[in-house]
Every structure is written in structure tokens, then in C-alpha cells.
Image (cartoon, rainbow, N blue to C red):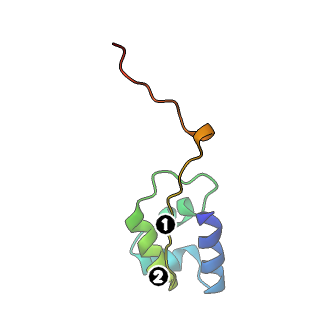
Amino acid sequence: LIRNDLIQLRERRGLTQKQLAHLMGVSQTLVAQLESATPRNIELRTLVRAAVALGAEIKLELREVREESKPKSRGRAA
């Protein structure tokens, strides 16, 4: 999970949430939210700021959904 990676990287760098927030140019509250169990509406640019501040990289991956996992399409009725 991203939150676990953020916490581990921050702690390995010896940074507090407040210090990381300063490096990112955001509030400590936002860093706490990123590290929370249920972060909401995280913007990619915020993750990029965290990665830069932590000397890390971000990898995004799109995977094909297996047929049985795909939601059924709601086609228009004729």
C-alpha cells in the first residue's frame, strides 16, 4: 500500500511528518492524511511531491481486469 511505503520511507529518512510536510510545501495534516488508513482524494501531484521529498520514485500500473471481475455493462434499452 502507498501509505505503508510513505511511512517506511519517511521513517528511514529520519523525518517527522512535519519535516516531510515542509519539504513537500504542504501541511503536516496533509501528510498525516496520506499516511492514514483511509486516505481520500489523493492527487497524483501530491504523491509526486512526497516522492521527490523522499528521494523515491512512483510506479503506476494498470492491469486488465479478469472477465469474471468486470462490472456488467449497462447498455441502453432498445
Where does label 1 land, which residue? 60
21 relative to 68 in the view: left or right: left
For the residues labelled 1 and 2, the Cα–Cα distance comes to 18 Å
Q: Which of 23 and 4 is in front in this view?
A: 4
53 relative to 37 in the view: left or right: left
Where does label 2 land, which residue? 53
Indicate whether 36 appears above or below 69.
below
Q: Which of 10 and 69 is in front in this view?
A: 69
Q: Where is residue 38 in the image (x, y as percent from the top left)?
A: 60, 51
Indicate whether 24 appears above or below 43.
below
Task: Return the mark for residue 38.
Answer: none
Q: Where is residue 69 in the image (x, y as percent from the top left)?
A: 61, 40
Occupied quadrant, residue 75 = top left
Q: Which amino acid type is shown beneath numbered disc 1? A: Leu
**Residue at 41% across / 70% down in the picture?**
26
SS for dot 1: loop
For the C terminus, which image quadrant?
A: top left
Q: Which amino acid type is shown beneath numbered disc 2? A: Ala
Q: Where is residue 3 in the image (x, y as percent from the top left)?
A: 61, 64
Q: Where is residue 6 in the image (x, y as percent from the top left)?
A: 59, 72
**Residue at 59% across / 78% down in the picture?**
16
For the N terminus, which image quadrant?
A: bottom right
**Residue at 55% across / 54% down in the picture?**
39
Indicate whether 72 appears above or below 76.
below
